[in-house]
Image (cartoon, helix red, strand yellow):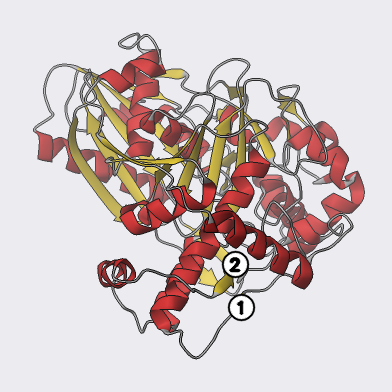
Amino acid sequence: MLVYAVDLGTTNLKAVLYDEQLRRLATASTPAVYRREGVRVEFDPESLFDSVIELIGRCARRAGAVGNGEATIVLTGQAESLVLIDRDGEPVRPGMSWLDDRAVAEAVELGDRFGLDEAFAVTGEPFPSATWPAAKLRWLSRYEPEAIASADSILMIKDYIVFRLTGTAVGEVSTRGFTYLWDVPNGGYWHEMIEFCSTPADRLPPVVPAATDLGLVSDEVAALLPPMTTYRVNIGALDHFCAMVGTGSYGGGSVSESAGTVLSLCLLAPDWRFDPKRKVSFHTGLRPGDTVLFNGVDGGGAALEWYRIQGLGGMSYPELEKQLRARDHRNPPMFLPYLTGINPPDYFTQAKGAFLDLDLGHDRVDLAYAVEEGIAHLLRRNVEYFAADPAQELVSTGGGAASAFWNQLKADVCGVDVVVPDELEATCRGAATLALVTAGVLDGFEDASRLNAPPAIRYRPSDDGRRAARYARFDNYLQRLFGDPGAPTENSGTEKKDTR
């Protein structure tokens, strides 16, 4: 059995081919293409599907994977992007990326109508956002009612590729918590919200568990794919949750960090109980009864990339790493990485980025250290807020995890081991694992750790008494500059929260 894991990423589309032993046989990728106009970000759904077919073909050619045998296509990737199709399966309008920010006013209306705490308890999302399909559907019902009227199925991006592969409109439960239309605790659509968004409930697809086998591809699609005896389709799961499986962190006590442009955190929470005061989103996990917590922090790698361009003149990351290692950093400045404003877990509405404790002895490398340390402080703030019990380890993937200096700094600041698997395709590896478990090739997620598992580097916290004082100073500056003794304002959560 061969497995094609297809990742519908925001920046890139990717396909990775695995065998039953989770050996990676081939990889292919292509940039995601968008049409941008102001706050509007759209894409061509049909071109997206064509790219998926082309990537599978490229993997097959590189691996020589044609002939007799069974293959499964399993899907992962982003969640919120929206596609509306008519009765013939044709898109009624361009797809709306989750990056599309036109529905800010409509997101405010969702919060005003239902109340933040009530909606949080139902949807699993602390605040409404223009990101969510609910806000976009309300916008469409107001400004493009003909699109809603002509839509036979209202799908998310992964649902659309499933439809094109199988001819069946169906959704998958781990992505539903990113719609603001789904009742997460009760496992069904939130019909009051759907009605408020002027969306016909019968246009929304039925929803199945993560990793459900949907059967064979359609005959039309089979003719487009490299020759094999059969191709089946597995619906897969959300990219963040697949990455947890791919790195072996889908287990209690391990916090999964995606250290990219956005700092994203996931945690399987076996004994989770809803608390409206803990503003962490909660979602249906990959197995019956699982709850996964999720936080997306805009002030992550984006802050370092900003400083690399604006403060270091585009210095390469390897050169920055070299210069950071050459210093002892005994008297660094402090940095608050709030360049995008509101960030969990505080949601300070007036927050801004700031350098503090500067003196004439500091240079641009000292400031670069402050940026990395400031993001590590923000990471610690979220990890401690995120997990009810102290985290056992932090499993890190993404571009930021390539920096050994920064990994050690995170371990020191957070006071917990940082584990970095040598796996560039953690999301696809996790998706392939789901498909193999469903097919009965593997008994469970844990089996994947015994099959060609990537080596990992573990960074252990150093015994440095300065760390607690540095973090206390960070907290003190944050509270004095931006601290709000009250709860977030009603509209504070409607600012854009990048979760990809």
Residue underneath mark 2 = 40
Give the residue type that dot 2 points to: Arg
Q: Badge 2: few (under 14), some or many (20 or more) residues near its Cα, within 10 Å?
A: some
Q: Is residue 67 left or right of residue 191?
A: left
Residue 425: percent from the left, percent from the top? 31, 41
Quick check: can you spot residue 51? Answer: yes
CA neighbours of label 1 inside 10 A, class few (<14), some (14 to 19), many (20+): some
State the residue at coordinates (85%, 51%): 111
Q: How many marks?
A: 2
Name the quadrant of the N terminus. Answer: top left
Residue highlighted by disc 1? 356
Q: Position of residue 122 (x, y in %)?
A: 79, 33
Q: Could you tell me if the residues under marks 1 and 2 are in contact, i.e. CB atoms within 8 Å?
A: no
Q: Residue at x 32, y 20 (%)?
A: 448
Question: Which x, y percent locates residue 147?
Answer: 67, 52
In the displayed structure, would residue 278 be above or below residue 136? above
Which disc number belongs to residue 364?
A: none
Q: As rendered, which of 84 and 411 lies closer to the eye?
A: 411
